[in-house]
Amino acid sequence: MKVTEHIEKAQGKTQFSFEILPPLKGETIQSIFDAIDPLMEFQPPFIDVTYHREEYLYKELENGLLQKQVVRKRPGTVGICAAIQNKYDVDAIPHILCGGFTKEDTENFLIDLGFLGIDNVMALRGDAVKSETYFSPEKEGHAYASQLVGQISNLNLGKYLDDALENSAPTDFCIGVAGYPEKHLEAPSMDSDIYFLKKKIAKGAAYIVTQMFFDNTKYFDFVEKCRKEGITVPIIPGLKPLATRKQLNLIPHRFNVDLPDDLIMEVLKCKDNEAVRDVGIEWCVEQSKELISKGVPVLHYYSMGKSESISAIASRIF
Ligand code: FAD
């Protein structure tokens, strides 16, 4: 079932969902099931599975030269989605990127998803590979998520890359895209970011999931701005409970997200990461309660592969 249908069916009741990461290469699917099992009692209508593109490593050879190696540390997004749908009978949403994909790769990826009975897909640009400062698309790929959304929408109309194909079956994907309550890192302004977000919707995206935020007013202001610009699709808030002291520096730097002073001071008082985890849970519970009181359609939690905090929060909310 599509995310938009899940939202309609809930008739205004806030639903619970979460995002997981594929395990590191070499681990088994059991680590995914172990992360999901404790969260199933909160009846998520859908579970997102992130996509991780290749990274470049440089291995020093005996002669001192460096050899470039291409590695994907977390493969398996599509297989995990199939396994989740099969085991839990819940919709799994694979993330798909512009980065590392040609249009042909994208089309084949989407065909696989269609064959597996996957109804939703989250379309993202992806970040620059770690060794590069700026994102660069594949030669035959997309530079922006809006172009990727355009390709998926075309496939939904039965328009494949090979226009000589006859009797080609249309797909029927519900497309999600990312939104940034505190502006995307590279966007010169909030207005320009929302301008391009609107393009993603115009190309066929049916809902938005936000970047994490720790101050709900950022989300409420963002939704208001989007609505003023004529964006009417559901805007699902993404939440992440803080779990380590290190994240105080990492999260603002990596995600262009501000942490409220009150939260920072609470974390600084903590003796260890167990105490930080408790602070993170309390903060996220308060955020969740307020968001529910304002009628958000879904609360979407970033689990980062660890379900303990999410489970502790969900048991007090759902
Ligand atoms: P876009 O919408 O393409 O925007 C990227 C930047 O370009 C923005 O600054 C935007 O304002 C600007 N822009 C857009 N269109 C144009 C244009 N036509 N001309 C000029 N500027 C333009 N990353 C992963 O690698 N794997 C994942 O699974 C993953 N999941 C995510 C899930 C969510 C909910 C979120 C919020 C992020 C996720 N990301 C993931 C991170 C995401 O890939 C990065 O934030 C990336 O840098 C931007 O992706 P986007 O789809 O928002 O890009």
Image: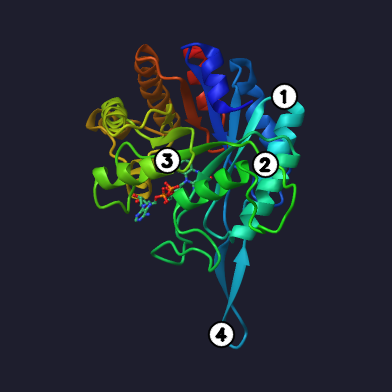
Q: Quick one: 237 or 116, which is closer to the camera?
A: 116
Number of the front mark, 4 or 2:
2
Q: Is residue 27 visible to the viewer in this orientation of the structure?
A: no
Q: Quick one: 115 or 165, which is closer to the camera?
A: 165
Badge 4 is on which residue? 65
Relative side of 180 to 57, left or right: left
Residue 156 place in picture, x, y as percent? 61, 41
Disc 2 residue lies near ligand 1 with CB under 8 A = no
Look at the image and tell me in which quarter the N terminus lies. Answer: top right
Q: Quick one: 199 or 235, which is closer to the camera?
A: 199
- Upstream in sequence: badge 2 or badge 3: 2
Q: CA distance from mark 1 to mark 2?
A: 24 Å
- Upstream in sequence: badge 1 or badge 2: 1
Looking at numbered disc 3 in the image, what kind of residue is underneath it?
Ala
Residue 124 has which mark? Answer: none
Residue 170 has which mark? Answer: 2
